[in-house]
Amino acid sequence: MTSLHPTASLQHRADELLRLHTSAEILSVVNVWDVVSAKAIADISETTALATASHSIAALFGYEDGEQIPVDLMIDMVGRIAAATDLPVSADLEAGYGAPGETVRKAIDVGVVGANLEDQMKPLADSVAAVAEVVAAGQAEGVNFVLNARTDAFLRAGSRPLDDVIADAIERGRAFLDAGAACVFVPGKLDADTVARLVEGIGPQRISVIGVPGSLRPSTLEKLGVARISYGPWSQRVALTALADLAISLYGDGTLPDNARALN
């Protein structure tokens, strides 16, 4: 397939995305799920990059999360988002939809320069092979693709001792970096001590976290050496909560708020 974006332009965006990850200033990305949400976030002066949320895009089309959405439908939407902005775009590509390298090649072809890739706590060798496959796909397309390799060590921890979970996350994170990932995504509600131990084990400006209700503030994470914070499905949930609350108000004889902005 012929790329819709010149390689030089893609590489410039990839370089910028990598720079944002390695800067001492934390990269905050408020996840988007379609073109209108992408434009609304991109138009905010503080926005330096965009990241999609797979859960939110799946929900947009009526699918459950967990690679239930057809891969080409996901690629079509992340491509529409990438085409709507000059900012670098990182896509949440779940576990690669059964073919991580090919999925990333398709994403690059529509203008995406980075991605999340879940390990789902599969055997470490298999997870490392998937990371290497993605890195190789970027190199084959002439782009230094910025892979945010995700480990689900905390999400699938169950009742395991915290020390064991942290050790797993560090082992996997180091292996993913050695295979060419730019950053290691460790989702979960993490306290300051846990984050500090992860940064010590994986490296400063090498871990990415998710913001959930009750999470540490970005400024605290920045001081701890975290590279990036994203918000997954929570940005869409907040937007939908506002929509539902508006409907409740209007059904109750309310009126439209005066502060609504024409963002669409």
Image (cartoon, helix red, strand yellow):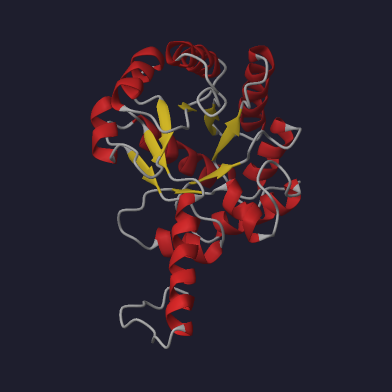
Q: Position of residue 173 (x, y in %)?
A: 50, 18
- Image position of 86 (left or right of 192): right
Image vertical order of residue 30 relative to residue 116, above or below: below
Identify the residue shown where x is 30% and y is 21%: 193
- Quick one: 261 or 68, which is closer to the camera? 68
Residue 166, can we see it?
yes
Q: Is residue 152 left or right of residue 58?
A: left
Percent coordinates x, y for residue 30 in the rendering? 42, 50
- Does residue 204 appear in this view? no
Which residue shows up at 61% across the image and 59% down it? 80
Compare residues 34 and 247 and report the one nearer the observer.
247
Residue 210 at what x, y percent from top left? 43, 38
Q: Residue at x 62, y 22 (%)?
A: 121
Q: How many numbered markers are drawn?
A: 0
Q: Foreground: 49 or 230?
A: 230
**x and y percentages locating residue 57 in the rendered image:** 61, 54
- When asked about the image quadrant of residue 43, the answer is bottom left
- The residue drawn where x is 34% and y is 41% is 214
Q: Quadrant of residue 223?
A: top left
98 to 34, vertically: above or below: above
The residue nearer to you, when weighing 79 against 219, is: 219
Q: Please give left or right for residue 125 compared with residue 243 in the image.
A: right
> Above or below — where is 264 with respect to 227?
below
